Amino acid sequence: MATHLTHWGTFEAESDGASLTAVRPWHGDPEPMPLIDNVASAQHHRTRIAQPHIRKGWLDNGPGAPGRGDDPFVPVSWETALDLLSGELRRVYDEYGAEAVYGGSYGWASAGRFHHAQSQAHRFLNCLGGYVRHVNSYSMGTSTVLLPHILADLGWMLGHSTSKDVIAEHTELVVAFGGLSPKNIAVTPGGVSRHHGRGWVAAAHARGCRFVSVGPLRDDITAGAAAEWLAPRPGTDAALMLALAQVLDAEGLADKDFLNSYTVGYDRFAEYLRGRADGAVKDPNWAETITGIPADRIRALAREMAAARTMITVSWSLQRAHHGEQPVWLGVVLAAMLGQIGLPGGGFGHGYGSAGMVGEPTRKRSVPRFPQGHNPIETFIPVARIADMLLEPGADYDYNGQRLRYPDIRLVYWCGGNPFHHHQDLARLRTAFARPETVVVHDAFWTGTARHADIVLPATMTIERDDFGAGENDPMFFPMPALTRPHEQARDDYAIFAGLAEKLGIGKEFTQGRTSQEWLRHLYDEWRGDTAELPDFDTFWAGDGIELPTVGESEQVMFADFRADPQGHPLTTPTGRIEIFSETIDGFGYPDCPGHPVWLEPAEWLGSPAAEQFPLQLVANQPRSKLHSQLDVGAHSQSTKIAGREPVRLHPSDADARGLHSGDIVRIHNDRGACLAGLIVDDAVRPGVAQLSTGAWYDPDPDDPSFCRHGNPNVLTADRPSSSLSQGCTGQLSLVEIRAYRDEVPDLTVGSPPATVLD
């Protein structure tokens, strides 16, 4: 058995050289995930890309030819593909410069640090002169911009959050806005060695810790928490939090000493709570009309929070929505009002229910990474604004206090990602993708993005190449020797870029004369240095992974140093304190994100006028059966579908009102698009809510790209920024209606390769 790593877990496998013949969880994982079953079953699926392909319209008529997403592809040799691509890259860089190339290449790609697709693409494009990049992520783009202004850098927080062991030992009450989703905490960028998402929650509950899960889905927390479920109208968490804060303020339960010593701006915020700014006191009666949560329960919860060692945790899902800054900011404010930030088991957490690395002991050292070189191009976009950039070159927009301008992109280069999964309003994205002159994609599979490219190069899966890897903040560092030979003509990204670099005269700059195996040895040796405790490369490569030290001498409590000595260990905010009111944000003058947290009505919620036509709130969360859209053709992912479609969950009362039953094929629609899905009737979903996970490969109707036959919810979601501050993704919530699909159910096409013709 050989060990290998995925973002959702470590596994052991046997191989006959061409395929995996047996796969099982790594022996050290106490809570393994069934997602590993997707790996072997997907490896030789018919949607694997077997050889290079060129879109026929592009091949016949040159760059900019119409038909992207519709034309058949022409299979070609590697030599032909690299000649055509190197020529096109030379043309674009010579005629338009590096600022005409978008190389952000957003996506999780695969586990493994050397063959990390985005790093490979960035190094190659930097050797050519640079590229337009992206900043932030679809998962937490709003928080990434907001939190440095008011609390701390999000990256630092993710690696230094109060450890789960400390919560299990000390916390008396966890109030989890957005829940603590078991499926999300089973995943970490780069991989997970030991899953224990259920274990720490069960230990805390056994000690007497209470859990309150606030969200539209009852099962967004493990059953071992025995949690109380509060289900406000989706998108109204900020109103609920304001009412909790109002009770703490009005009843003298706020810790004034902490607020005076560690925060700035509370008085300005309190004026808003008390209604002196707008005439509306933000009390529980006010919040009940917005959220649907009884006022008495809001008052009681505020008192319970003040009487206990309380952890306020906010999932990333809350900030993936219109005005998503507000609930995150209010989570910080509530924790500050309770005065428990920096105490064991108290304070604020962001992402305990979003990814596995949050709350893990901080790793003392990072692992080796492939150097990307220097990008001289300063132009960037917030990642969720890609369609705006492609559709509106030269347009001005706001971002984090800056006034920026979209570049005029002529060539898009994408490796290891699928924007036709991550992005919103896919019909609009499809229109945007038609604008560049050339789109280049490396991928192992015929995903939606590969089908909307001009030049498609087949990449290997991790099991088909040598690498090493470790998850973010995970202590285990694994060798990842190839388990099988590559599928058909697939090559790893390094080999592809090395071949292109040779044709473009930058071969030595890109490879530095090293093969991929030589790079692995070089990076490891450079990382190891003279550390005697670490094995040499040959020993590491022949072993089963090494455990790296973590900061474990004392309890890991976020902001403990700041609490102990706010002058000696100030925060990195402009004032060095927690900013309940931010002079910086206020100075930007954004109406959609003022200087302190407020209630701002989302464009689409159950209390908006649009709900009269579309009365169901769609929750487009992360899937249980795969990571994002990765390996959607795998056996475990396919086993969860209904008649090949992604499942949608609906409360029994909403299903009955529409004459629907479990197993029905339904049409979900709004004024942006529609999709088919298979219905599951489930009382774990709040009434008025439809839950359809992301991840189904986009399968547009050939006559209507806004209609996905497979069940991708992003044909329904709005391509709307969270605010002018962050320009973050808002794909979590939208309004829809659901009806039975009475027409003949169309065949799916995403399970097969696109049409090809011989040149």
Image (cartoon, rainbow, N blue to C red):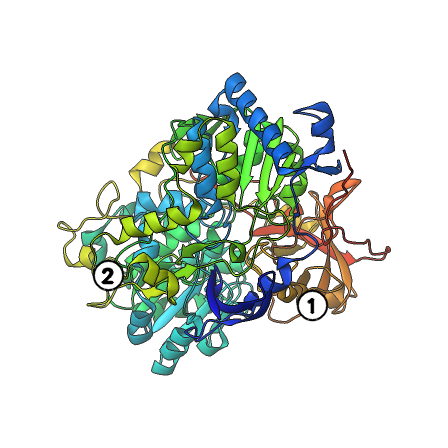
Residues packed near mark 1 inside 10 Å, few (<14), some (14 to 19) or many (20 plus): many
Q: Decide: is 594 above or below 282.
A: above
Q: Residue at left 56%, top 21%? A: 91
- The extreme bottom residue here reads 206
Q: Residue at left 33%, top 54%? A: 367
Q: Indicate the quadrant containing the C terminus: top left, top right, bottom left or bottom right.
A: top right
Tell me, yes or no, if residue 115 can be seen here. yes
Residues packed near mark 2 inside 10 Å, few (<14), some (14 to 19) or many (20 plus): many
Q: Look at the numbered discs 2 and 1 and tell me whether their residues touch, using CB distance below 8 Å.
A: no
| Residue, disc 2 | 342
Q: Decide: is 79 above or below 225.
A: above
Q: The residue under label 2 is which amino acid type?
A: Gly
User: Viewer-proximal residue, 635 or 648?
Assistant: 635
What is the distance, in whole Å, between disc 2 and disc 1 at their CAs?
43 Å
Element type where label 1 sits in the image: strand
| Residue, disc 1 | 680
- Give x and y (percent) for residue 593: 42, 40
Q: Residue at left 46%, top 78%? A: 224
Name the side, left or right, on which 73 lies relative to 212.
Answer: right
Q: The residue under label 1 is which amino acid type?
A: Ile
- Give x and y (percent) for residue 383: 49, 39
- Give x and y (percent) for residue 296: 45, 69
Quarter-of-image position of residue 557: bottom left
- The extreme top residue here reads 95
